[in-house]
Amino acid sequence: MIVNARSRNGRDQFTQACAAMQGMPFEVDAHAVENPDDLVETVHKALARKPDLLVLGGGDGTISSLVDHLLGHDVILGVLPFGTANSFCRTLGIPLDIPGAVEVLKTGTPRRIDLGMIDGDYFANCAAIGLSPQIAQTVPHGVKRAFGRAGYLAWAALQFAKFHPFELIVGEGPAARRMMATEVRISNGRFHGGTELVEEARLDSGEIIVQVVAGKGKRSLVRNWAASFFKLESRRVDTLTFHGQSLRITTIPPLPISIDGEVLATTPVQAKIAAGIIEVMAPAV
C-alpha cells in the first residue's frame, strides 16, 4: 500500500487505512510518501517484489500519474479515495470512506478496465480543456491542502470571471467538426470534478468519449454544470458527444489540458483508448 501523504489529511488517512487493513487475509506492506517526487521510485520498488495487489491511496492526479508504471506487470490495482473529488473511485463505485474502500479490497473482484490516453500519456478517468486546466495552472500552492474543496471552489469562481470560450476542432480532414466551445471532457469515466458529467462513458467500453460543452458564451458552461449537478434533463442541451478509439483534438488558440487534475499537455493532441489494459479491484457485482 502506497499513500500520497502530502495531500490534505494524508498522514491521518494513512493511519486510518493501516488500522482498517488489520485482519486482512494477506500481509500488507504500507508506505506513507510525503514527497510526491518519491512516489514513482516507491512504486517501482514495490513492483520489484511482484505483489498480487498494489494499493494506491491519493486523489485522481496521484492515481493517473502512477498507473502508467503498473502496465506490463501482473498486478491488480487497488484504490483508496484520499483526494478532493475522487472521480475515479466514484466511476468504479468504490465507497469514499476508508472502511468502505478497504472492504472492496477484501471482498471485491478484479475488473479489467480501459485507460484513456493523451498522446502517449495514460490516464485513469478524465482529461479536460477549458476552465479546469486554467484553474489547475493558476491555483496557489497549498490552497486545497489548507482550505479543502471550499478554497478550491472560491479560486474557481475567480478564474471563471477571466475565462473565454475557444474554437474547437474534433477530427481531421473533411470529416472534422469545428465549433465554439466552453469545455471539452476527454473521458474514460463518467465523473469529472466529483460530478457525473459524461453519462455515456464506461471504463470497459473500448472507446474514448469526447464531450463538448458548445457555445459562444460562458452561460452554457454554468447551465451544464448546474443541470448535471441536479440531474436535470437540460444537462444534455448544450453538449455534443464524439465516440472513437482515437480522435484528434485541436483548439484555436492552443490550450492546456488537465489530466485528472494535473496540467500535463497542450493542444493539439490525439485522444485514444487503451482497451482492457489493467485490472482494478472493484465492488463485487
Image (tube, rainbow, N blue to C red):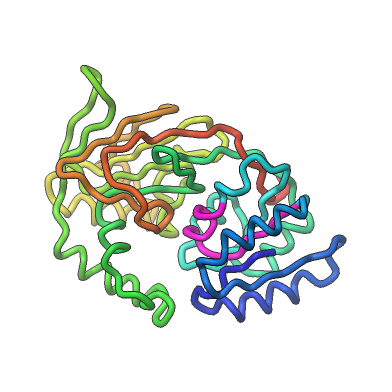
Against 246, residue 54 (above or below) is below
Percent x, y for residue 75? Answer: 72, 47
> Eyeballing the image, is 35 above or below 257?
below
Q: Residue at x 66, y 51 (%)?
A: 77
Res 215 quadrant in image: top left
Residue 28 falls in which quadrant of the image?
A: bottom right
Q: Residue at x 15, y 49 (%)?
A: 165
Which residues lie in the magenta part?
A: 53-66
Q: State left or right for residue 29 relative to residue 236.
A: right
User: For the C terminus, which image quadrant?
Assistant: top right
56 in magenta = yes
Picture coordinates of residue 64, whole percent (x, y): 50, 53
Question: Residue 138: where, in percent of width, then height?
Answer: 26, 67
| Position of residue 103 in the picture relative to residue 169 (left or right) | right
The location of residue 52, given as percent across then percent down, is 78, 50
Q: Is 244 in front, or is 92?
A: 244
Residue 60 lies in the magenta stretch: yes
Residue 270 or residue 183, whichever sits in front: 270
* Res. 142 image quadrant: bottom left
Q: Residue at x 78, y 55 (%)?
A: 107
